Amino acid sequence: MRTFWDRVRHTVLFEAIALFLVAVIGSWILNRPVAEIGMLGVIMAVLAMSWNMLFNWLFDLWDRKYRNFAKRGLFLRAVHATLFEAGMLIAGLFIIAWWLKVSLWEALIMDISFALFFLIYAYLYNWAYDTIFPRPEVV
């Protein structure tokens, strides 16, 4: 198990590096100011954290009512992840369109790009973190 402070370091580094990458690479790709894309990154991070809390709370309420917290298998976990990402895409779509003043189509492309970036980034970040800061040996 990782310590509380190790988890704090993991989370802070994850968000800081992601925000830097999104702001710099996103501004370059979209030909927009770094501050504008960086602030969009902050808004999207707050959205992701808020949606994560709300969605998982609602999912747990549903799970308790209809399944009595039975073991979650592969299928239910896939449904959970898909519904979470669908909610993020829908909310993100309107935020991106509003913040950048672009069409919903352009916002959808950007939103999907955000999702793909974070899928790849989370995989690479966690691999690198585990390599640089290995978990303590289990006794």
Image (cartoon, helix red, strand yellow):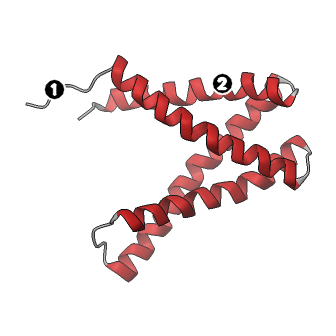
Residue 85, position as x, y percentages in the image: 59, 56
Residue type beneath disc 1: Glu
At label 1, counting other C-alpha atoms closer than 10 Å, the crowd grade (few under 14, some 14-19, many 20 or more) is few
Q: Residue 17 sits in which quadrant?
A: top right
Q: Are marks 2 and 1 in contact (CB under 8 Å)?
A: no
Height in image: 63 above or below 128? Answer: below
- Quarter of the figure that contains the N terminus: top left
Q: Residue at x 68, y 41 (%)?
A: 114
Residue 24, position as x, y percentages in the image: 73, 21
Q: Which residue is mark 2?
A: 21
* Residue 95 falls left or right of residue 78: right
Q: Residue 25 sits in which quadrant?
A: top right
Q: Calculate the distance from the C-alpha at mark 2 to the C-alpha at mark 1.
A: 32 Å
Height in image: 113 above or below 94? Answer: above
Height in image: 46 above or below 128? Answer: below
Q: Residue at x 75, y 37 (%)?
A: 40
Tag shown at residue 137: 1
Height in image: 69 above or below 102? Answer: below
- Quarter of the figure that contains the C terminus: top left
Q: Nearer the viewer, residue 3 or 107?
A: 107
Q: Which type of secondary structure does the marked residue at label 2 adopt?
A: helix
Q: Residue at x 34, y 79 (%)?
A: 67
